[in-house]
Image (cartoon, rainbow, N blue to C red):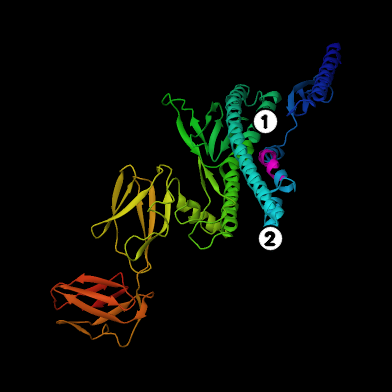
Amino acid sequence: MGIYSLTDSAMAGLNIAQAGILTTSQNVAGTSVEGYSRRNANVIMDSLAPNSLMLNGSSFAVEGFTRHYSSLIGSQLLIQQSKSSYSDTLVQYTNSVDSLVADKSTGLNTAISNFFNAMGAYAADPTNKAMAGAITGTAKEVAQRMTGMSTLVNQIQSDARTALTDTVAQVNTILPALADINQKIVDGNSPGVSAPSADLLDERDRLLSSLQQLVGGQSLINSDGTATQLVAGMPLVERAIANKVTINADQEHVALTFNLQNGPTKGVLTTVQTLDGGQAGALLELSNNFVPTVQKRLDTIAMGLVKVANSAAQTSSGLATNLAIFGFKVADKTYSSLATNDLSGNLPTIENENDLLDLYSSLGNAISSNSAVKVGNLVGTYTSISSLTAGSNTLAGDYTLTKVGTNQLNISDSSGKNQTVSLITSVSGGLQTVDFNQLGITLQLENFSPALSAVSSSSVVKDGATVGAQTISNMEVENNVQSGTYTFSYSGSQVTLTSSNGGSQTLTLVDGTSAGQTLNFTQMGISFSM
């Protein structure tokens, strides 16, 4: 063995030991760095001895450094970080509401119980002035706690929207940083020669972790080591291309502005419909769902208190109460009398979730409570408004419905804007949707006219009956037709079918032919072959 072989082997051993010491020191120091992965020095034989008689052909070297990493564990960790951030954010913002509700000294349940206990005590001894004073005190306590809780949830919504703005700003800082790391990974990747450094891969995962905590979504590691971050199937970062996140004007959604590398100077804006994880997803959930739901619950409680408490001193339904304990203050006006001409007199009964949803649907966006356009109002003799929906562009004010001709309906607002639409003929029990899209209002009309279900044996309307020179050869009756006596009457070329239940419909006859004709009384639910 030559002296040079001894020297080379010794130097190789020193290099390998030095690489081991280097990785060990880095691993020790890296324990305090978030996202750091443990490294290993890879040792190879870079030269082989030609035969068993020679040892001086063998040589050793450090091929490179690799990190300990599991793609399965890494992907699961990112998913859990998104979920954990979502839950932590919800708890952080709703904790104040939980504390307020759970605390007996500040909770709404306690205040309402105290009020009704005071009402019961006063009812048992109405001459006791102290008990009368207790009603006033407990009522004020209920009102204060209702107002306090409403203020609190409104503040939660305001804080959530402010935090969402900050979150989006952080995301837009991370996205180009991840795109830059992706480009460096591509530059450092030479298949068969070198791979991206562990430092670049750690930084990639560190940025992905931050994105998961902020906005959630799906993190993908591509075959070349670069990362793609998706939300709702749309890319935030695609290798070296970073898009931008914005908040829509309605503050209810976020949107992506796509970075078009070879296209127009302005990117394409696309709304992200849902965010299921991350801090941003929780903030949108708070602002769009949690706060409105709590406010609806408070509205329900308030309506119930006004109706129940104030009606105790009401002599008759529709008349003003003699003692208004609770009420609604709107600007400089207070509504509390329960009189027919007062807004409080039109409060619906809310018994379940569907009643509350129907109320908000009927109120829509801005339809006035004393408007002629509201659920339950009649449109003609046998047609009523069964549901009403107002869109986001609906203006506040009173609306009026007017019948135009025989098959048209006109709606107009207080400023004079109007729209006329055509109606279709409906049968008894039938529904039709009328869309006044220019004013942002959609109505559903219900036909409740009487109809036949079982024609009386004594009725003149039956198979074989004659009308002038024409004979009824067949009669068809809808399933929902009411029983009763039905009669024909005619004037000129028109024939009218009238029910003993009050419904009627008139049709115009044509000259009889050998093929006959059909009289279809659609509103009555019955047709005749003549």
The earlier-in-sequence mark between 2 and 1 is 2
Residue 223 visible in the picture: no
How packed is label 1: few (under 14 Cα within 10 Å), some, or many (20 or more)? Answer: many
106, 94: nearer the viewer: 106
Residue on which disc 2 sits: 120
Q: Report the magenta residues as a range.
A: 82-98
Left or right of residue 439: residue 180: right
User: Where does residue 372 sit, x and y in percent of width and height?
Assistant: 37, 53
Kindly report which numbered mark, 2 or 1, lies closer to the viewer in this rendering.
2
155, 35: nearer the viewer: 155
Considering the whole magenta stretch, tell me its main secondary structure: helix
461, 154: nearer the viewer: 154
Quadrant (top left/top right/bottom left/bottom right) for the N terminus? top right
User: Where does residue 69 sit, x and y in percent of width and height?
Assistant: 73, 33
Left or right of residue 60: residue 116: left
Mark 1: secondary structure:
helix
89 in the magenta segment: yes
User: Where does residue 213 sit, x and y in percent of width and height?
Assistant: 66, 35
Report the residue at 64% width, 26% height from top: 192
